[in-house]
Image (cartoon, grey):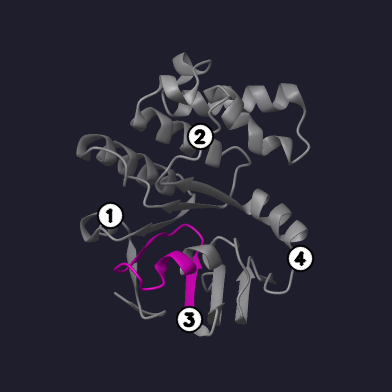
């Protein structure tokens, strides 16, 4: 049986109009990510990889081209419908952690489930299980300012798993961490992938990219695979 892409981009263009200047951030990008893969999207600054991440993560719609998530064309969906699908299918881990500072670790992990109509009991139970998964159950009631950078990123990973997504999209997940902590985060992403979660990691670090099963190199808004 042929493998089925979880996300597919076909001839995707993203064009920004900045005053009188037209910027073609993507120039006909075509790529597929298959269920169960660990893929790295790599490229230098200005290559278009951040825009590609937005497309893979369904955070933006293309100027031209087609994006399919689990076979559904999301290119023409409104933001409300897109956000609903994104919330169920994709978990996000960012370089800046993006935790809400006024909430505890437990509350941060619970938050995505609020938008999927889970009960308070369900949200708290699942959030605590996820904090246990990343060895932070003893920090459940601590706020981000009381956690180290590595601990904050582990909370962010737990949060990304809150709605049991099919795919984790990690944008420079070790960029703000020391080498040893970064290696722990990479090991955790590989474990998630081994357990069946599709992982897409955006990075400019060629050594980090080698942790993936497949690397997609982006340059000048298009890609070549290796």
- The residue depicted at 53 percent of the width and 85 percent of the height is 20
Q: Are marks 4 and 2 in contact (CB under 8 Å)?
A: no
Q: Position of residue 123 (x, y in %)?
A: 68, 28
- Magenta segment boundaries in residue numbering: 25-51
Is 111 left or right of 16, judged from the image as shown? right
> What mark, if any, has residue 158 been given in the picture?
2
User: Real-space Cα distance between discs 3 and 2?
Assistant: 36 Å
Q: Can residue 226 be seen in this view?
A: yes
Between the C-alphas of marks 4 and 2, the distance is 28 Å
Number of the front mark, 3 or 2: 3
- Where does label 3 land, which residue? 23
**Foreground: disc 2 or disc 1:** 2
- Disc 1: which residue: 211
When the figure is inspected, residue 144 is found, relative to residue 156, above or below; the finding is above
Q: Nearer the viewer, mark 1 or mark 4?
A: 4
Residue 1's spot in the image, x, y percent? 54, 72
Give residue 78's mark: 4
Using the numbered discs, state the Cα–Cα distance from disc 1 to disc 4 in whole angstroms.
35 Å
Q: Seen in the image, is 59 located left or right of residue 186?
A: right
């Amino acid at each position: 049986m042929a493998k089925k892409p979880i996300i597919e981009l076909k001839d995707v263009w993203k064009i920004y109009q900045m005053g009188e200047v037209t910027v073609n951030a993507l120039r006909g990008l075509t790529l597929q990510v298959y269920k169960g893969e660990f893929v790295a999207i790599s490229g230098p600054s200005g290559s278009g990889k951040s825009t590609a991440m937005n497309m893979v993560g369904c955070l933006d719609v293309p100027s031209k081209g087609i994006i399919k998530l689990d076979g559904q064309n999301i290119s023409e969906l409104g933001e409300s419908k897109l956000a609903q699908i994104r919330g169920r299918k994709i978990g996000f881990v960012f370089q800046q952690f993006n935790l809400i500072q006024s909430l505890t670790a437990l509350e941060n992990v619970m938050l995505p489930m609020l938008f999927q109509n889970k009960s308070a009991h369900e949200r708290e139970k699942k959030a605590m299980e996820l904090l246990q998964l990343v060895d932070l159950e003893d920090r459940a009631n601590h706020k981000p300012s009381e956690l180290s950078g590595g601990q904050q990123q582990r909370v962010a990973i737990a949060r990304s798993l809150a709605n049991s997504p099919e795919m984790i999209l990690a944008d420079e997940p070790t960029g703000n961490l020391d080498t040893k902590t970064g290696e722990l985060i990479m090991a955790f992403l590989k474990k998630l992938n081994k357990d069946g979660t599709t992982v897409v990691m955006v990075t400019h670090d060629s050594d980090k990219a080698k942790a993936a099963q497949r690397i997609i190199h982006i340059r000048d808004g298009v890609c070549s695979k290796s």
